[in-house]
Image (cartoon, helix red, strand yellow):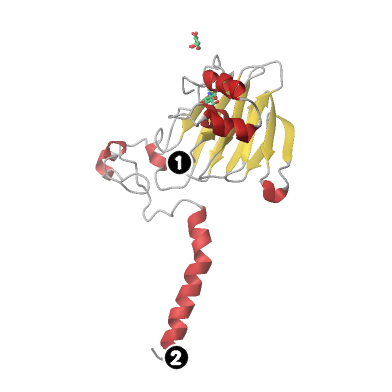
Amino acid sequence: MGYSQITLVGGLFITVLLLAPAVLATDPDPLQDFCVADLDGKAVSVNGHTCKPMSAAGEDFLFSSKLAKAGNTTTPNGSAVTELDVDEWPGVNTLGVSMNRVDFAPGGTNPPHVHPRATEIGLITQGELLVGIIGSLDSGNKLHSRVLRAGETFVIPRGLMHFQFNVGKTEASMVVSFNSQNPGIVFVPLTLFGSNPPIPTAVLSKALRVDGGVVELLKSKFASGS
Ligand SMILES: *[C@@H]1O[C@H](CO)[C@@H](O)[C@H](O)[C@H]1NC(C)=O
Ligand SMILES: *[C@@H]1O[C@H](CO)[C@@H](O)[C@H](O)[C@H]1NC(C)=O
């Protein structure tokens, strides 16, 4: 290779290295206006969903009414998540965004959880919610928390653990959005105590510094997988 070829190859290599984190940080960019998800096309393994032909997409794929209705908060957590990711809204396919609505009974919680593929931004629409976000060890494992009321907002960097808790006397609700069409969710209690198959009790006993009986008790609470 001549000098100019080496410079070119080196330049390309450095460009790829510089771009790589940006490319991996969010969903890939779309290459067309619309790519309405073909949810029945799941047998095809792609990074997301294949597009329906526009002739089969209908007229309404840019709109959804699914967050208009409150969820039923009579659940073990006292909260109900209404998801609106690509599986509920095929129109967001390839667009790198999605939403959720969460309703809370008084004392209800959205248990500590993590979204592996998205940063989250949220707006309280009703009531009073304690919102907590825990930094990673890099930032000292610090809990950032505040009670937020209707109209107030929060942001949760991708991958950080967070929770909400209704500290008010009435129902509370919030609407959140994500910079991924499929943010994913890892609920800490369910992941630790309700995995399938279960994490061995000896592992959790050592990790959590309690005896096996405590671990078994916690596992019994999440045995149903929800
Ligand atoms: C909410 O869920 C509870 C428990 O499953 C059920 O008993 C109740 O009827 C539901 N309420 C409504 C309004 O659907
Ligand atoms: C309640 O918490 C569990 C994890 O502990 C989770 O699987 C479930 O989706 C939550 N339910 C609601 C309605 O928030």
Sequence-first disc among 1 and 2: 2
Q: Residue at x 72, y 38 (%)?
A: 143
Q: Residue at x 46, y 19 (%)?
A: 224
The image position of residue 90, as x and y in percent, is: 37, 38
| Residue in the foreground of this view, choosing between 113 and 101 | 113
Pointer 2 residue Cβ closer than 8 Å to ligand 2: no
Q: Residue at x 55, y 14 (%)?
A: 74
Above or below, 134 against 83 in this view is: below
The image position of residue 55, as x and y in percent, is: 25, 42
User: Is residue 44 shown left or right of residue 65?
Assistant: left
User: Is residue 58 shown left or right of residue 85?
Assistant: left
The image position of residue 178, as x and y in percent, is: 53, 42
Tell me if mark 1 has few (under 14), some (14-19) or many (20+) residues whose alpha carbon lies within 10 angstroms of its own: many
Give me the C-alpha separation between circle 1 and circle 2.
45 Å
Above or below, 30 against 159 in this view is: below
- Residue 111: which quarter of the image? top right
According to the picture, the residue beneath numbered tag 1 turns out to be: 182
| Residue in the foreground of this view, choosing between 1 and 117 | 1
The image quadrant where one finds the N terminus is bottom left
Which tag is nearer the camera, tag 1 or tag 2? 2
Tag 2 secondary structure: helix
Q: Amino acid at mark 2?
A: Tyr
Pointer 1 residue Cβ closer than 8 Å to ligand 2: no
According to the picture, the residue beneath numbered tag 2 turns out to be: 3
Q: Is residue 132 visible to us here?
A: yes
The image position of residue 59, as x and y in percent, is: 33, 37
| Residue in the foreground of this view, choosing between 57 and 109 | 109
